[in-house]
Image: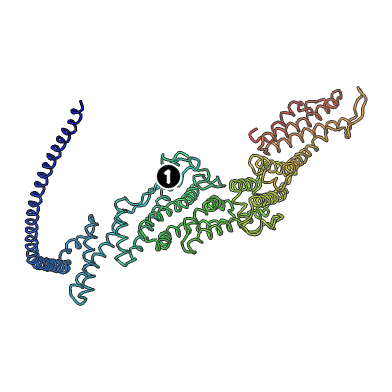
């Protein structure tokens, strides 16, 4: 057992040794393989280095050969480019010498219908001019292309004039009326556009204008522009006037169906009726008012067009020139209206001056828009409307003052007095005139204030109201007009009182004054005149009623000479059944006869008198009928049982009912 133990380690060692020897052998083989591979690698490396060295030598040789060739090629390319550029420049220069020939046909035929091509042609000519001026200023070619350029510019100017002349047309009257009659109450109403030129034509004109400004160095086209457009503006307004003359009197239809409603304060509102109204004159006034509005609208439209065509720094001056003819014609027509009013005043035809009021109101109402439209024009242009307004206010105020004086000084001509005691023509005309003022109360009040007539009417002036005519307040103007109306009514009352003295019969005089006072009062009450009058005379209405009552009382006194026969005066005292003496019977006979004759005479006379107011006529008749009837019945009652004649029917001619019927026929010219 001991021997076995010692043998086992010896076997293990041998096995371990063999294992190590085998691994060593393998490692030696591996090392030999590596060494062989390294030797091969060294050989390959040496071969590669040799190849690379050879390649480097060859590259250097190639570079040394190629670089000179490359440099030669670059030089050749540069030379080629220089040749090409030189040839191109030569072609370009040579082209300038051919410009005149190449553009001859296009220039001769002009720009019409091919503006872009024409402008491109002009641009070529312009470049040729610049070239010769810079490089060969003494060459004959410069003169040739210069002449061609000037010819081209002339034809452009001619085309500008031709397009404007051919396509500028007066705006149709109906379109103008639609444009100025916009209803401000309709928020979304489509604005009427005034198109003066077709869009394509406008663009050509703008293009030509821009070229002439930038290259043409010529402003003559601006004169051409304002002359042509000025003529069309004036023709548009004249066409509107002619439209009024042709259509107003006949049909009264002045507007196209496009406009159904009109602004309250636009010129569509007719002037009020005037004494002796002339329809032709009415049309002229209405026409003038519309033409003022048309001028503003057309001028605004012209300015909008002008800003697209004329350079900005020339726009205001050109616009000023453009509107002069139309504006001057309007102002001249306004001056003629003022002159006509002045002549009417000289003829004492004050109603004719009322033509100024609707015009003046419209001018003042549109003055701010007028001023805005003319903003930037010359002072002489902007002052034309204010000057016309001042002239109208001056002549209007003069007419008002002279009218008041004429009412006061109207002569008392017997042949001019109404035979029936009715309303005098002076009264009806005066009231009608004042009613006209009512329609233009603001204008009339401002007119009076502009002439500083406060002292004339004894109006207490507030310093704030009199600092200037233009700053007068509406309330002051209203008081001023109220005082004026009261002055006219006062003058009228004094004149009527004077005229009434022409009548020999005081009763007819009373009827005359009654009729006139009543007419004045009723006229004041029917209109708003009474409100104006009471601004300065609060008791005016009651004063007229008192005057009317006074005249009725005076008239009733005319019956006293008839009624005195029915009183107990001189009536005999007698006992019932007693026989009257001849003298006593005669007294009763005389009373009957006096009453009968007086009644017949008065009824005959007064039946031809007139009281136009039915209410007043009935009141006076009934009042007088009651007075006379009551007195007559009482008289008959006293004489009922008295035997004063054998022929009672001779004296007792009328029954009380018949007397009443006779009085009922008073003031009835048809009875």
Side of 161 where 658 appears, left or right: right
The residue positioned 6% from the left and 62% from the top of the image is 58
Q: Position of residue 343 (x, y in %)?
A: 55, 58
Q: 321 above or below 29? A: below
Side of 604 where 293 appears, left or right: left
Q: Nearer the viewer, residue 262 or 272?
A: 262
Q: Nearer the viewer, residue 368 or 394?
A: 368
* Label total for image: 1
Q: 443 above or below 574? A: below
Q: Position of residue 72 (x, y in %)?
A: 9, 68
Point out the image quarter for the N terminus: top left
How many other residues sit within 10 Å of disc 1, few (<14), some (14-19) or many (≥20)? few
The residue positioned 15% from the left and 32% from the top of the image is 11
Q: Position of residue 411 (x, y in %)?
A: 67, 53
Element carrying mark 1: loop
Residue 261 visible? The answer is: yes
Q: Nearer the viewer, residue 173 or 106?
A: 106
Q: 344 above or below 32? A: below
The residue positioned 77% from the left and 30% from the top of the image is 626
Q: Nearer the viewer, residue 293 or 598?
A: 293
Side of 117 where 54 appears, left or right: left
Residue 146 visible? The answer is: no
Protein image colouring: rainbow
Q: 264 above or below 393? A: above
Residue with the mark numbered 1: 191
Residue situated furthest front in the rendering: 2
Side of 417 where 319 appears, left or right: left
Q: Position of residue 498 (x, y in %)?
A: 72, 50
Q: Quadrant of residue 448?
A: bottom right
Point out the image quarter for the C terminus: top right
Q: Quadrant of residue 600?
A: top right
């Amino acid at each position: 057992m001991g021997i076995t133990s010692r043998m086992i380690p010896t076997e293990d060692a041998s096995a371990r040794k063999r294992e190590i020897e085998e691994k060593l052998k393998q490692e030696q083989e591996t090392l030999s393989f590596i060494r062989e591979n390294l030797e091969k690698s060294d050989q390959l490396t040496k071969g590669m280095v040799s190849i690379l060295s050879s390649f480097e030598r060859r590259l250097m040789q190639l570079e040394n050969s190629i670089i000179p060739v490359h440099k030669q090629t670059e030089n050749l390319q540069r030379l080629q480019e220089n040749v090409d550029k030189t040839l191109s420049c030569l072609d370009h220069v040579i082209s300038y010498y051919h410009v005149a020939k190449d553009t001859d046909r296009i220039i001769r035929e002009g720009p019409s219908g091919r503006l872009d091509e024409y402008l491109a042609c002009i641009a070529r000519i312009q470049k040729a001019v610049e070239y010769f001026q810079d490089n060969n200023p003494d060459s004959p070619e410069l003169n040739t292309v210069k002449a061609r350029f000037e010819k081209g510019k002339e034809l452009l100017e001619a085309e500008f004039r031709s397009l404007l002349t051919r396509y500028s047309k007066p705006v149709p009257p109906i379109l103008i009326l639609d444009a100025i009659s916009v209803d401000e109450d309709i928020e979304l109403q489509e604005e009427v556009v005034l198109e003066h030129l077709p869009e394509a034509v406008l663009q050509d004109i703008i293009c030509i204008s821009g070229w002439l400004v930038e290259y043409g160095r010529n402003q003559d086209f601006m004169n051409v522009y304002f002359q042509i457009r000025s003529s069309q503006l004036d023709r548009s307004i004249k066409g509107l006037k002619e439209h009024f003359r042709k259509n107003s009197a006949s049909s009264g239809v002045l507007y196209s169906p496009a406009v159904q409603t009109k602004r309250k304060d636009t010129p569509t509102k007719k002037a009020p009726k005037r004494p002796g109204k002339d329809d032709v004159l009415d049309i002229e006034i209405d026409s003038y008012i519309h033409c003022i509005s048309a001028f503003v609208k057309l001028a605004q439209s012209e300015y909008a067009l002008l800003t697209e065509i004329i350079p900005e720094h020339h726009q205001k001056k050109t616009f000023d020139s453009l509107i002069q003819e139309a504006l001057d014609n309007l102002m001249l027509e306004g001056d003629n209206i003022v002159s006509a009013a002045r002549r009417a005043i000289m003829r004492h035809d004050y109603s004719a001056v009322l033509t100024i009021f609707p015009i003046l109101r419209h001018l003042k109402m549109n003055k701010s828009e007028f001023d805005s439209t003319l903003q930037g024009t010359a002072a002489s242009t902007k002052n034309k409307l204010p000057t016309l307004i001042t002239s109208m206010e001056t002549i209007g105020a003069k007419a008002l003052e002279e009218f008041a004086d004429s009412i006061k000084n109207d002569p008392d001509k017997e042949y001019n007095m109404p035979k029936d005691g009715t309303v005098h023509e002076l009264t009806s005309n005066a009231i009608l005139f004042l009613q006209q003022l009512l329609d233009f109360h603001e204008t009339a009040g401002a007119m009076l204030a502009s002439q500083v007539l406060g002292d004339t009417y004894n109006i207490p002036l507030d310093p704030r109201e009199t600092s200037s005519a233009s700053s007068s307040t509406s309330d002051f103007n209203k008081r001023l007009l109220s005082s004026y109306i009261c002055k006219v009514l006062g003058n009228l009352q004094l004149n009527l009182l004077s005229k009434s003295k022409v009548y020999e019969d005081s009763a007819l005089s009373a009827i005359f004054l009654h009729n006139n006072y009543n007419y004045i009062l009723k006229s004041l009450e029917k209109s708003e005149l009474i409100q104006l009058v009471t601004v300065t005379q609060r008791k005016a209405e009651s004063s007229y009623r008192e005057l009317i009552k006074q005249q009725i009382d005076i008239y009733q006194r005319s019956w006293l000479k008839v009624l005195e026969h029915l009183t107990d005066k001189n009536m005999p005292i007698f006992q019932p059944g007693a026989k009257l003496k001849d003298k006593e019977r005669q007294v009763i006979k005389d009373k009957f006869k006096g009453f009968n004759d007086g009644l017949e005479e008065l009824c005959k006379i007064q039946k031809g008198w007139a009281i136009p107011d039915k209410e007043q006529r009935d009141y006076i008749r009934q009042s007088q009928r009651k007075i006379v009837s009551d007195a007559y019945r009482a008289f008959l009652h006293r004489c009922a049982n008295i035997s004063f004649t054998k022929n009672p029917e001779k004296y007792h001619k009328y029954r009380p009912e018949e007397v009443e019927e006779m009085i009922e026929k008073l003031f009835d010219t048809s009875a």
